[in-house]
Image: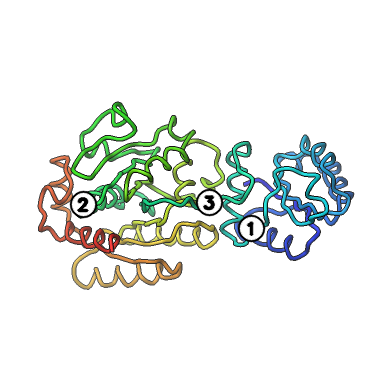
Amino acid sequence: MPTVITAISSSETEGFIAGTLFAQGWSVVFRAIDWESLERYINANPEAARGALLLFASDLPGITKAKVDAITQKIRQTIGFSISAQRESDFIDLHEVPQSTTDLVSLVRGFVRAPMVRGLNTPQRAARKARVIAVGSAGSYTGCTMVAMNLAMELSILEKSILLIEGNYRAPSIAAYLAMRNLNSDGPWKTIAPHLSLTEVDQEHAGTIDEFMDRAAAEFEYIIIDLGSISGLSNRLTDRRWTSTMTTWCCDQADELMIVSRADQLGAHRLSQVIDLLQSTSVRAALSFVMNMKSPGKRGDSEESRFLSSATALKPIRIRSIAKDSRAVMAAEDEHATLVEINERSNLRKSIAELARELKS
């Protein structure tokens, strides 16, 4: 993460901005009280300034547009906030001061990723008819793809129009699981079942992700996104590489981020790491948790108790556990099919169907 310099006269506004970013893991290296002190710091610390993000406000004593323009050559990036009405006419592209932690963090992340394409105001979650649910994995081999794919199928059975998106750039699995190729060869998505379409977001789509998702949201009622592992989430949210685009979009714009974890000891450890990370990382998406592969009997009760103890710390909108059913999973994998196509009476299929009905209600 880049370091931060603040240049804001209002102590309340500066305290909110600096304190919020510090709590998110950013390093606030200097807090200027006027333009003269800001220039002294930058001139005395050119290397530090070159990698810093300057957050300034129009109320800073001595500030002018010409001075800000001149100093941008010595700073990595700048974000301006509108506070003093008397001086606002001197500037362009000033932002209203965000009213919440998530709005502030989302704005700053956006500048770090793509400073030249931001709008004039704090980004807000887009109004849309589609409900967007991102499914992320707390570690590896959690069954995240299995949950995302079968959840999409179950919602389509409920006669909802569904788009399933392969958003796991590092280890895409859905197309391989279903033995499909060239998903985007005939258009932005491919129909694979009644009410169900599938697509994958590649490097080409990543450059226009907002437009792509707006188009999808206008056509479908539900969008299910398989993100794969979300380990190292805080770093990916400020990463400019295209491989982090989908994860960042989901944290800022999805309605729900569903985190899938394994029930075993390693799964519990990976989940605790993700929860620790989320406790210090603001995301707009509502959080939910699914513990997959719960063991039978007393061992399963112990796993669920441990899972609930960890997950409830973040006050998620839903918590679910799914019993282990290796036979159903292996049969579906062998046939390159979803669970309902293999055995609609399996307990695993029934669990995911129940989750789909809950999401629909």
Q: Nearer the observer, disc 1 or disc 2?
A: 2
Residue 33 x, y percent position in the rendering = 84, 57
Disc tally is 3
- First in sequence: mark 3 vs mark 1: 1
User: Residue under circle 2?
Assistant: 159
For residue 112, above or below residue 345: above
Disc 1 to disc 2, C-alpha distance? 39 Å
Mark 2 nearby-residue class (10 Å; few <14, some 14–19, many ≥20): few
User: Residue under circle 1?
Assistant: 98
- First in sequence: mark 1 vs mark 2: 1
Give, as a three-letter code, the residue at label 1: Pro
Q: Nearer the viewer, residue 294 or 174?
A: 174
Disc 3 to disc 1, C-alpha distance? 20 Å
Q: Nearer the observer, disc 3 or disc 2?
A: 2
Q: In the image, what residue occupies the spot 42% across and 42% down?
A: 213
Q: In the image, what residue occupies the spot 79% across and 47% down?
A: 89
- First in sequence: mark 3 vs mark 2: 2
For residue 34, above or below residue 183: below
Q: Are marks 3 and 2 in contact (CB under 8 Å)?
A: no
Q: Nearer the viewer, residue 57 or 321?
A: 57
Q: In the image, what residue occupies the spot 56% across and 58% down?
A: 102
User: Residue under circle 3?
Assistant: 234
Horizontal side of residue 262 vs 17, given as left or right: left
Residue 27 visible (yes or no): yes
Q: Nearer the viewer, residue 357 or 347?
A: 357
Give, as a three-letter code, the residue at label 3: Ser
